Amino acid sequence: MREHDLPAPQRRGRGKSRFDDDEPYFLKRGRHAEPVLSEPDDEPAPEDAWSSWDEAVHGPEPHPDWLVTELAARDTELGVLKTGKEADVHLVRRAVPDTDRSCLLAAKRYRDPQHRLFHRDAGYLEGRRVRRSREMRAMAGRTAFGRQMIAGQWAAAEFAALARLWEIGAASGRIAVPYPVQLLGTEVMLEFIGDAEQGQAAPRLAQLRPDGAELRDLWEQLVDALAVLARAGYAHGDLSPYNLLVHRGRLVMIDLPQVVDVVANPQGPDFLARDVRVVGSWFAARGLPAAAADPAELTGVLLREAGIR
């Protein structure tokens, strides 16, 4: 991640204790009754709060037509989509009362300093800098303030990377990521990828068993996306079949807080090579010809795209 100013971190609740970073676990949700709307001058309940759009950093313009940006909208918590070691993802409905304007959002909330943060963050943070030396020292020493700074940097890094990649994807069609709706402190709000009517998230690649033409098509989509990342100077940094969604035949890349600057980070090429090995092994195990998924060859191509070789 290149130099940028970080937003002030926002404190959040403790969240769930069960993690699913490595295995899919989605909480079952039944139908939710429509919230009882309060009087216009009343403060909304915590589970039905005013939209935070006006307070946040916004995603790329023009904003998608489906996105609700009206300040009269309210955000209703519908449940937890995913729990993890570093962040929890909540399902939120943003709607304007007494209208048909509404959308589903995925709110990714990074943990506060009281939680165990990013057990493997040191390598990813190389090449990222903040402008004030006090903040750099606090991050290096993992003080309470430093841990807040790190959490804010993860959120800001993911938001910035998604914004750039979404714009590239909108123009070229070569990469798909969720639209980054807004950034507020240590919370990133994203486009919900899945069945909006049912509130069912799109399956992860790891949950599927594609073969034949479908397998090759998904691999070609992945190679295109990796090339876009490399040309933008990035490696995903933690790519696996668990952070790739498949929605209506389209491969969608998610979970980019640890995005690595392959030029500024001395370990950048190693992270890129590991990404390729992990996903290449998954595709090869499902029948993709070895020649098509040669990790060494693809890594070389991507490093050239990044301007390293």
Image (cartoon, rainbow, N blue to C red):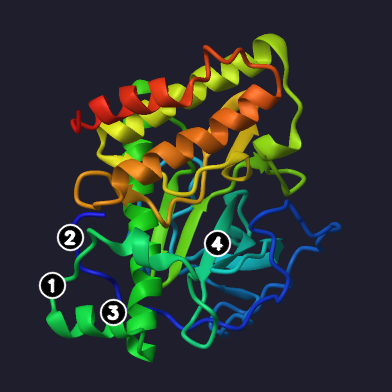
Q: Please tell me how crowded label 2 is: few (under 14), some (14-19), or many (20+) other residues with Cα within 10 Å.
A: few
Above or below 278: residue 85: below
Q: CA distance from mark 3 to mark 2?
A: 17 Å
**Which quadrant is home to the N terminus?**
bottom left
Q: Is residue 297 left or right of residue 16?
A: left
Q: CA distance from mark 1 to mark 2?
A: 8 Å
Q: Secondary structure at mark 1?
A: loop
Please, what secondary structure does the residue beneath circle 4 have?
Answer: strand
120 above or below 262?
below
* Image side of residue 199 versus residue 70, left or right: right
Q: Which residue is mark 1?
A: 131
Question: Residue 52 bears which disc, if any?
Answer: none
- Residue in front for this viewpoint, 17 or 43: 17
Mark 1 or mark 4: whose residue is earlier in sequence = 4
Quarter-of-image position of residue 240: top right
Residue 62 in sight from this viewpoint: no
- Single out the mark in the foreground, 1 or 4: 1
Give amino acid for label 4.
Answer: Ala
**Mark 2 is on which residue type?**
Glu
Q: Quadrant of residue 270?
A: top left
Q: Are marks 1 and 2 in contact (CB under 8 Å)?
A: yes
Q: Give the residue at mark 2.
A: 3
From the viewer's perspective, is the residue at label 3 or at label 2 nearer? 3
Q: Amino acid at mark 3?
A: Ala
Task: Please provide percent x and percent y for residue 62.
Answer: 32, 40
Pointer 1 or 2: first along the chain: 2
Q: Earlier in the sequence, mark 4 or mark 3?
A: 4
Q: Which residue is mark 4?
A: 107
Residue 140: mark: 3
Taking depth in this image into account, of 38 and 202 the one nearest to the observer is 202
